[in-house]
Image (cartoon, rainbow, N blue to C red):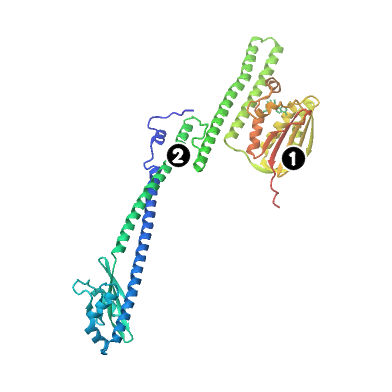
C-alpha cells in the first residue's frame, strides 16, 4: 500500500522535520524553573524566619537589660543622700552611673542621656561611640528604638519614672555570633538546595527522556502504519495514558490491516464471480453462431444467456448496494413502523414463490414497533424469506414470527430446509460465501444476499444471528433484533 510521493513533498516534510523545540527540552527547562523557584522560596522563608527569630531574642534580652538598668538607676537615685532633683543627680553622677550599670550588665558599653538627649555618661568614654542622632529623637519622645550598626545593635530605651521621662539609656548587643550562624546556615542551605536541584533535575530529565522516547516510538509506529507496514505488537508497554494510546494505535493498525485484507478479498471475489457468468455467456454466444439450424440448442443457449445475464445484473446491483452501504448511509429514512405489518407484506409477496417450491409459510406475528428505513427492512425480510424457501425441501415449512422482548423487537425465520453446516455458520455473512457452489448456481445464488442483510441490519443498529437448532431438528433459524421504538407521543 505504498503511495506515490515526490521528493520534498508535504509527506517528507512531516516525516523528517524534527520539532524546533522538543517536548523533552520544554519539560526539562520548565522543571528547572519550577525547582529553582521552589528551592529559592523555601530558602528565603527559612532564612528570614531565622533572622526574625534571632532579632526577637536580641530585642527581648535588651529589653530586659534596659528594665534592669532603669530599676538600678531609680534605686541609686532614691538611696542618694542629698536630695538633688533628677537632672542635677544625673549631670553630677552620669559617668559613674554608666560604669556602675556596665558592670551590672556584664561590662557592655552603656551610654546615658538626659531628657534632652545630651550625653551625661559613657562607660567606655575612650572608644568611639556609634552615631545615634537619627534615632535619639524618637527615644526622647518616649519610644524604644534600635539600629544596627556594623555587627552590633544599638538600643535606646527611655527612662520613665513617676515624674515623667528623665533620660535615655543606650545599650549595645553584639550580633557577630548570630551573623556567623546565619551565614553558615545560608551556605548549608545553598549547598543542600543546589544538590536537591541537581538530583531532581537529573531524575526529571531521565523520566522525561523515557516519556519522549515512548512518544518517538509511537510516532515511528504511526509512520510505519501510514506506509502500509502494519504493526502487530504494541510499540510500548506502559500502564499509563501513553500505554493506552499505544494499545489504541495497535488496535487501529490491526483494524486497518483487516479492512484492507477484506477489501482485497472482496475485489478478488468480485473478479472471480463475475468471470463465471461472463464465460458462460461467451460460450453460449459461440454456440449461437455454430449451431444456427438447431432450434432446441439455440433455445437452450438463449435461455442460459438470459439466466447468466440476470445473475450478473443481480450481482452488480448487490455489490453496488453493499459498497454504497460501506461508505455512506445515504437513502436511509428512519420512520416508525410495525414489524408485524412489514412481515405480513413480505409473506404475501413471497407466497407465489413458496407455492411454486411447494413450501408452506406460517406466521405468528405480534405487534412490535421500531424506527427504521422501510426499504432496508423489506430488503432484509425478503432476502431471509427467499433463502428459507430456496434452501428448503419439497413439502417443507417456513415459520415467520415476531414479538417484543426486553426492549427489542425479535424476528425469527425458521425453516425445515437443508440446514447450514456448523462450520459454515462463521463464514455465512461474508460476501460471495455459498455453502455449495453447485447449489448456488442451481438456485441462481450469488452469496451476497446475507452479507448485504447483515450490513443493512447493523447500519440500523440491529443484530442478526444464526441460532443452532436442538439436536435432531432439521433446517435453520435466523434471529434478527432491532431496538423497540419509544412509545409514540399522544
Ligand atoms: P445466496 O444468494 O447464494 O443465497 P446468501 O448470502 O443469501 O447468498 O446465502 C449464502 C449461503 O448461505 C447460501 O449459499 C446458502 O448456502 C446458505 N444459506 C442461506 N440461507 C440459508 C437457509 N435458510 N438454509 C440453508 N442454507 C442457507
Location of residue 59 with respect to 412 vertically, above or below: below
Looking at the image, residue 277 sits to the left or right of residue 67; the answer is right
The residue identified by callout 2 is 215
Classify mark 2: helix, strand or loop.
helix
Residue 100 coordinates in the image, percent (x, y): 26, 78
Q: Residues within 10 Å of mark 2 (few under 14, many from 20)?
A: some
Mark found first going from the N terminus, 1 or 2 = 2
Please give the name of the residue rendered at 23% of the width and 87% of the height, measured from the top-left corner: 88
Is residue 26 visible in the rendered image? The answer is no
Task: Tally the numbered discs.
Answer: 2
- Please rate how many residues cluster around mark 1, counting C-alpha atoms within 10 Å: few if below 14, some from 14 to 19, many from 20: some
Q: Which quadrant of the structure image shows residue 165?
A: bottom left
Q: Which mark is residue 238?
A: none
- Residue at the outermost bottom position: 83
Q: Name the residue nearer the viewer: 34 or 357.
A: 34
Q: Which residue is under mark 1?
A: 341
Q: Tell me if I can see residue 190 in this picture.
A: yes
Residue nearer the viewer, 376 or 412: 412
- Residue 210: image location, x then y, percent: 43, 40
Secondary element under disc 1, as helix, strand or loop, is helix
- Residue drawn where x is 63% and y is 41% of the image: 333
For this view, does 160 lie left or right of residue 370?
A: left
Image depth: mark 1 or mark 2 in front = 2
Instruction: Give the x, y percent position of residue 258.
Output: 56, 30
Rendered-image quarter of ligand 1: top right
Q: Say which residue appears at 40% left-offset and 29% top-offset.
A: 6
Amino acid at each position: 500500500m505504498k503511495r506515490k510521493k515526490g521528493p520534498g513533498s508535504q509527506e517528507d516534510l512531516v516525516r523528517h522535520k524534527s520539532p524546533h523545540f522538543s517536548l523533552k527540552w520544554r519539560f526539562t527547562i520548565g522543571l528547572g524553573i519550577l525547582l529553582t523557584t521552589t528551592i529559592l522560596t523555601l530558602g528565603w522563608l527559612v532564612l528570614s524566619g531565622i533572622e526574625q527569630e534571632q532579632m526577637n531574642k536580641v530585642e527581648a534580652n535588651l529589653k530586659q537589660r534596659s528594665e534592669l538598668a532603669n530599676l538600678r538607676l531609680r534605686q541609686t537615685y532614691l538611696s542618694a543622700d542629698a536630695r538633688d532633683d533628677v537632672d542635677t543627680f544625673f549631670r553630677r553622677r552620669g559617668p559613674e552611673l554608666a560604669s556602675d550599670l556596665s558592670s551590672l550588665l556584664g561590662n557592655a558599653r552603656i551610654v546615658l542621656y538626659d531628657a534632652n538627649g545630651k550625653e551625661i555618661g559613657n562607660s567606655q568614654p575612650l572608644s568611639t561611640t556609634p552615631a545615634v542622632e537619627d534615632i535619639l529623637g524618637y527615644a526622647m519622645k518616649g519610644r524604644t528604638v534600635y539600629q544596627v550598626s556594623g555587627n552590633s545593635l544599638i538600643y535606646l530605651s527611655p527612662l520613665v519614672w513617676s515624674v515623667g521621662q528623665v533620660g535615655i539609656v543606650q545599650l549595645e548587643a553584639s550580633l557577630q555570633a548570630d551573623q556567623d550562624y546565619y551565614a553558615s546556615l545560608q551556605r548549608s542551605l545553598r549547598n543542600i538546595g543546589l544538590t536537591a536541584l541537581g538530583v531532581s533535575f537529573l531524575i526529571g530529565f531521565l523520566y522525561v527522556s523515557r516519556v519522549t522516547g515512548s512518544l518517538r516510538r509511537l510516532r515511528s509506529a504511526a509512520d510505519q502504519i501510514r506506509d502500509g507496514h502494519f504493526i502487530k505488537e504494541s510499540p510500548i508497554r506502559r500502564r499509563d495514558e501513553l500505554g493506552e494510546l499505544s494499545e489504541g494505535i495497535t488496535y487501529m493498525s490491526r483494524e486497518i490491516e483487516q479492512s484492507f485484507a477484506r477489501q482485497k478479498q472482496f475485489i478478488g471475489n468480485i473478479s472471480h464471480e463475475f468471470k463465471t457468468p461472463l464465460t458462460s455467456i461467451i460460450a453460449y454466444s459461440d454456440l449461437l453462431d455454430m449451431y444456427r439450424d438447431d432450434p432446441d440448442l439455440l433455445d437452450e443457449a438463449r435461455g442460459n444467456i438470459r439466466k447468466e445475464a440476470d445473475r450478473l445484473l443481480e450481482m452488480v446491483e448487490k455489490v453496488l448496494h453493499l459498497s454504497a452501504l460501506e461508505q455512506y448511509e445515504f437513502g436511509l429514512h428512519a420512520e416508525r413502523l410495525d414489524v408485524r405489518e412489514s412481515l405480513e407484506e413480505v409473506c404475501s409477496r413471497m407466497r407465489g414463490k413458496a407455492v411454486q417450491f411447494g413450501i408452506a409459510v406460517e406466521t405468528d406475528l405480534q405487534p412490535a414497533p421500531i424506527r427504521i428505513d422501510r426499504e432496508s427492512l423489506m430488503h432484509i425480510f425478503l432476502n431471509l424469506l427467499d433463502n428459507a424457501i430456496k434452501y428448503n425441501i419439497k413439502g417443507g415449512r417456513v415459520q415467520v414470527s415476531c414479538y417484543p422482548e426486553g426492549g427489542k423487537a425479535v424476528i425469527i425465520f425458521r425453516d425445515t430446509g437443508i440446514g447450514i453446516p456448523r462450520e459454515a455458520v462463521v463464514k455465512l455473512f461474508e460476501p460471495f460465501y455459498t455453502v455449495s457452489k453447485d447449489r448456488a448456481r442451481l438456485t441462481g445464488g450469488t452469496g451476497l444476499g446475507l452479507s448485504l442483510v447483515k450490513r443493512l441490519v447493523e447500519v440500523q443498529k440491529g443484530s442478526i444471528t444464526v441460532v443452532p437448532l436442538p439436536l435432531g431438528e432439521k433446517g435453520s433459524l435466523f434471529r434478527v433484533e432491532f431496538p423497540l421504538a419509544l412509545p409514540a407521543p399522544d
